[in-house]
Amino acid sequence: MRCLSMGEYLKSIKNKTKYIIVTGGVMSGLGKGITTASIGRLLVDMGYKVIPIKIDPYINIDAGTMNPFQHGEVYVLKDGTEVDLDLGHYERFIGVELTGNHNITTGKIYSKVIEKERDGNYLGKTVQIIPHITDEIKLWIRKMAMENNAEICIVEIGGTVGDIESMPFLEAIRQMHNEERDEDFLLIHVTLIPLDLGKEQKTKPTQHSVKELRRIGLQPDIIVGRCANKLKEETKRKISLFCDVPVEGVISAEDAKDIYEVPLMFKDEKLDKYIIKKLKLQERRQSNEWEKMVKKLQNFEKEIKIAIIGKYINVKDSYLSIREALKHAGIATGCKVNILWIESENLEKKDKVKIDADGILVPGGFGQRGTEGKIKAIQYARENNIPFLGICFGFQLAVIEFARHIIGWEDGNSSELAKTEHPVIDLLPEQSKVNRFGGTMRLGDIEVTIKPKTIAHKLYRKEKIYERHRHRYEVNPKFISEFERHGLVFSGYSDNGRRIEIIEYPKNNFFLGTQFHPEFKSRPYSPSPPFIGFVKAALEFSN
Ligand code: GLN
């Protein structure tokens, strides 16, 4: 019997995964991640099982070592993989929990291939980009789709068509296109439609980037045109004519007021219907959960102002998940959360700190720069009974502030920052044992136990929770009893009580800190409990 080729084999399976590939043209930063996430949302709303995959063509294995100044926030998945913030968009929009396998990088693919080569798997052949690297890419995508029983697998390719780095991935996609049936494969190209000086919509850059795609053997089925305003019919017709895409396949993606409006905008453009038609799928039930959430978002009656004291505040994306989590809590409590960004270093220069806000949030961070400013902000919040939420580094600095100004240990500090007699935040000796990833960082979902009759318990209404971590240092157990004597409550712990996870100060209306990052699990329709508590307290404060 003749062996089936991979392509013939795939064609022979009936109910298999359909693939939607999303590429980008003209320039980066067009919101390809949000486009991908929004398409995922529309398909989920129609009742399809969708999995997203993000391809990052950089050589890093993951985003763990990347600087937030350059890349925006490092997002942490439940298995502890540190990834690009687009995976945060996927989780929030599509409502799935992802793992490191949903993120493919050049680093990961090459490592796999080199490992196989050392194991002698290539039987003496010369190992090459085509077919070995491209095979590995296709295998990874298909395996993920199969293992997750995906009806639809959406693959976003980071970067812009034409980048050297993304070539092997696009070549793999080209091969996949040939191997899959037409109705199982859809290519969506996201491009920029700039306005000229007379505010005319210009299609030439799009034509060029589609040409670039064709040069490598790919033809888009759908073009999503990012533009400051809605694409005119005439613009759509022009793109259709030059790029060989039917007019109904040219989709307008004008700037939205809020990213959560994008799925609805696409729905208005009938993108969901068009995708279903092209993939020869049935229209299933339509859920309006998302629409209801967006309605709330568009009709807030109240407003509050939250100060975020950070050090990457020029790059707003550095705190993306926190911004989103605040918004989610706002949706649940019916108020618009305005953010006042404060550069912590600026607070350091001031003798007397004054922060005009209904709540103060100190987010995660690393290193010395700006920490004294953050501590000043925490002191201000505590002394003036302004609702306070400290996350990770913010939580650690709240412990330090308490040590210095309530217990009276002026040299109270973290051993990450200084050598001191009172290292109230320290490296725990057994730290390395819990780590599953080779480094010394404590990462990903860890079970946290919450003490009954605490604020944390009121918020979570559970004794066992799972939250995502990304840190090295922890509360030093040596000093705990002294803190408790002065009224600080350690309301959450992990690792049989060895590690402190939550602090609260019941003397204030709302003063809470978490060693973990609750923002990573917050969703627009199920906000994170600490954020709800914080926003509610800020709302009360504003009244
Ligand atoms: N720098 C601190 C630590 O490593 C906090 C980390 C963070 O805020 N993510 O423990």
Image (cartoon, helix red, strand yellow):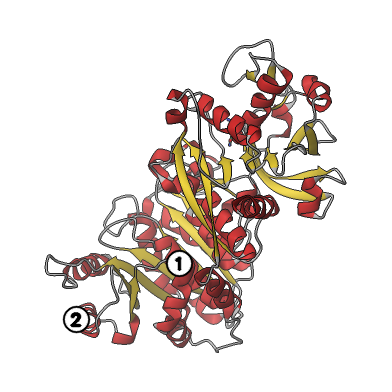
Task: List x then y, in percent, for residue 215.
Answer: 23, 66
Does the rendering let one see residue 6?
A: no
Residue sitting at x 68%, y 39%? 513
> What residue did someone put label 2 on?
238
| Callout 2 secondary element | helix
Q: Quadrant of residue 418?
A: top right
Could you say which is closer to the camera, residue 441 or residue 458? 458
- Residue type at mark 1 is Thr
Task: List x then y, in percent, for residue 450.
Answer: 82, 44
Vertical position of residue 312 compared to residue 13: above or below: above
> What residue did someone put label 1 on?
36
Q: Quadrant of residue 397?
A: top right
- Residue type at mark 2 is Lys
Task: List x then y, in percent, for residue 350.
Answer: 45, 25
| Callout 1 secondary element | helix
Other residues around mark 1 within 10 Å, as few (<14) / some (14–19) / many (≥20) = many
